[in-house]
Structures are given as C-alpha cells and as structure tokens.
Image (cartoon, rainbow, N blue to C red):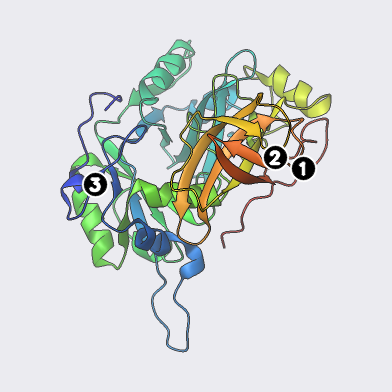
Amino acid sequence: MADSGMTNSPLLQWPGAVAASRPDEGVAAHYGDPFREQRALDSAHAPAGPVARPAAGGFADRSNRGVVTITGQDRRSWLHSLTTQHLLELAPGDAAQALILDPNGHVEHHLTLTDDGTTLWIHVEPGAAAPLVAFLDSMRFMLRVDVADVTQDYAVLTVQGAGRERLTDGLDGVLIPGTAGRSDISDLIVRRDLLADTAAELVRRGGAVAGMWAFEALRIAARVPRLGVDTDHRTLPHEMGWIETAVHLNKGCYRGQETVARVHNLGHPPRRLVFLDLDGSVDRLPEHGDPVVCANGGTSAEVGFTGSAARHYELGPIGLALVKRTVPTDVTLLAGGVAAAQEVIVSPDAGGNVKVTLRRRTLL
C-alpha cells in the first residue's frame, strides 16, 4: 500500500475475496460474484411487491483510501480559503466535495468531507493523504488548526443502495451522506481496529459485501469521474463536470481560481468527459490510459485517453474517457481498439458562462 505503510484490509480474509489491483491494492476486487454484488448495491434493485420487505443495500470496503482530520477553531474558514468549495456554513453532519488546484487551475486533490462539530473529516484517493497533509501544513501560518493523517487509525466503508440509512443507523463512526456526487451512497469512517466488526454488523443487518469491481462499475454507470483514473496532471474542473458538484463560483479567492473564472466566463475547457458504451462483442476492456481515436474520422490521431472501464450487470461493457472538446458528439470512438458509442457528460459548450446540465444517471 502506498499510503502511510497501511496493511491489507482484514476483509481480504473473508470467503471468496480476491485482491484488487492498482489503484485499489489492499482491498477486494470481488467476493466471488461481481454481478450479484452490483445488483446488491444498485438502488434501482430495491425490493418491490405486495409484501413489505426491508430495502436492499450493501457496502464496499474502501479502507485503502486516505483519511485526514482538521481540528481547531479556524478549520472551516481556513479550508474554505484553500479549496474550490464554500465551507463557511457547512453544518455538522452535512457532506461536501472540494478540490485543491495548482496555481494554473489543474486539479491536485479531490476531497470528500464532513464536519462533526469539532473535526473536519476528509477522505481522499489511496496514497493521497500524505501529500495533502504536507500541502495543508505548508499553508497553516498562524491559524488555529491542526492537520493529521489518520489513515492508519481510520478506514472508509461505503454503504450503498436503498437500504443504506437502515444499515448505518446507530453504527459507531463518522457518516458522510450522499458523497462522491451520488445521492445513493454514504461513507462511514470507522476506527480501523473495528473495521471487520463493523463490516460483520452490516452483514448481520442484511447488507451484502461488494468489491471494488462492483463499486467502480456503478460509479462509471453514474457518470462520476475518479481523480487519478479519469484525470491527468492537466485536468481542469470544467472538463470533469466538477463545476457542478465541487466548485462554488461565488466565493473568495483561492489558488487556481483565475483559471476557473476565465474558463467559466470567457472560454471553454480544451477537453470533455464522455461516457463510453463499449462494443460487447469484444472479449476485453480497454485499459486505463489507452488512446482514444475517432473510428470514422479518416485519421489515427489520438483525441483523448481511456480512464475507467468495467462490465456492468445490465449495461454490459462501459467506460469513461477524456477527449478533445472539438470531437463531434455523434462520432464513434475507438478506445484501446474497442469501438464505443459516446454519450455526452460534459457538453462541448461548457464554460463561456453557459449553463450546462450534466447528463448523469438519476440514481434515486
């Protein structure tokens, strides 16, 4: 594991567990039946019928993610000044997404966070906690804040599906509701030494354990990008649609704000996120970083790269890609040699003070 010398999850010892590969080393890819695990997590498959039954649901072990805490009287106003999000009025128990940008407006960190009244709890991509804490420490100055990488002591379980409120009710931990841009999931941050016991309690309550293959397939189907997988070092918030979920356009100055404002008011981002409906007759998926070209464009010039790809239990093979804004929206693409129809997520007209409605799947 890349983050703080963290060891593998104890859930890898559960029956059927198969370890995931990069970027999700340390947790399970699946527990023997990825499609069944997807169905358990999917809100669209809540029980129905004349006989009332408890709502379905399940959980994914994402204990490989980094966890950071910020305490102190100035914690919200300080983080507000450093990120793209408006956090001054964040109420205890509310959730938010935020970005930290470099001076040129490129995305460096994606934060999922909540405040419990005394502490800001943040989780980030695997391996990202240490560099995030290093940056935050460099910006403390004389403010009353304390920042800590608590990844070794705390872990993330993501509870998903129509029964998530019933599953998490009364559990010991910090609940972040409606996270990652999706209203059908909640993240539960628990003590790492209680990870296995909490997971067992979720199962006792009727929750199904699911691996990262299931979680990622549903994330892709929901058209939600993942930092470091669907992005690169040049990614701008507008390109991912994070303007709608992780950026507040009417707040004070922060690093990279000039680029955000310029794109939003005067121009367009150079690239856009697209959903890939991949050819199901091909027995392989494109890999992360595979080039994307236009299938009928008469040229082999790359127009983007493949981010995520997975096999969905209903939709078949699907993926996300980042392509040039000028690529026609109706052209068939080749992602790593696999034909794909594209669906617009971020419009080519994004920016330029155009109101854009992201085309993301309605989950509830």
Q: Is residue 178 visible?
A: no
Residue 253: image location, x then y, percent: 68, 20
Judge depth for marks 1 and 2 and give the one in front.
2
Q: Position of residue 56 (x, y in %)?
A: 40, 69
Q: In this orientation, which residue lies closer to the viewer: 49 or 28?
A: 28
Q: Any mark on residue 346, and which?
A: 2
- The mark lying in front, picked from 3 and 1, is 3
Q: Mark 3 and mark 1: span between their CA atoms?
A: 40 Å
Marker disc for residue 356: 1
Provide the residue designation for mark 3. Answer: 18
Residue 110 screen position, x and y as percent: 51, 31
Which of these two is toward me, 237 or 97? 237
**Tag 3 and tag 1, C-beta contact below 8 Å:** no
Left/right of residue 226 with respect to residue 211 in the rendered view: right
Height in image: 327 above or below 363? above
Question: Against 96, is 48 above or below?
Answer: below
Sequence-first tag of 3 and 2: 3
Q: Which kind of residue does numbered mark 1 sit on?
A: Val
Category of crowding for the residue at label 3, using alpha-carbon neighbours closer than 10 angstroms: few (below 14), some (14–19), many (at least 20): some
Looking at the rendered structure, the kind of residue marked 2 is Val
Tell me the number on the disc at residue 102. none
- Farthest residue toward the bottom? 50
Quarter of the C terminus within the rendering: bottom right
Look at the numbered disc 3 and give the secondary structure of its residue.
strand
Question: Which of label 3 and label 2 is nearer to you?
Answer: 3
**Residue 202: x %, y % from top left:** 28, 60
Is disc 3 in contact with disc 2, using a CB cutoff of under 8 Å? no
Kindly tell me whether residue 190 is visible in this rendering: yes
Counting residues from the start of the chain, the first of labels 3 and 1 encountered is 3
Position of 348 with respect to 235 (left or right) is right
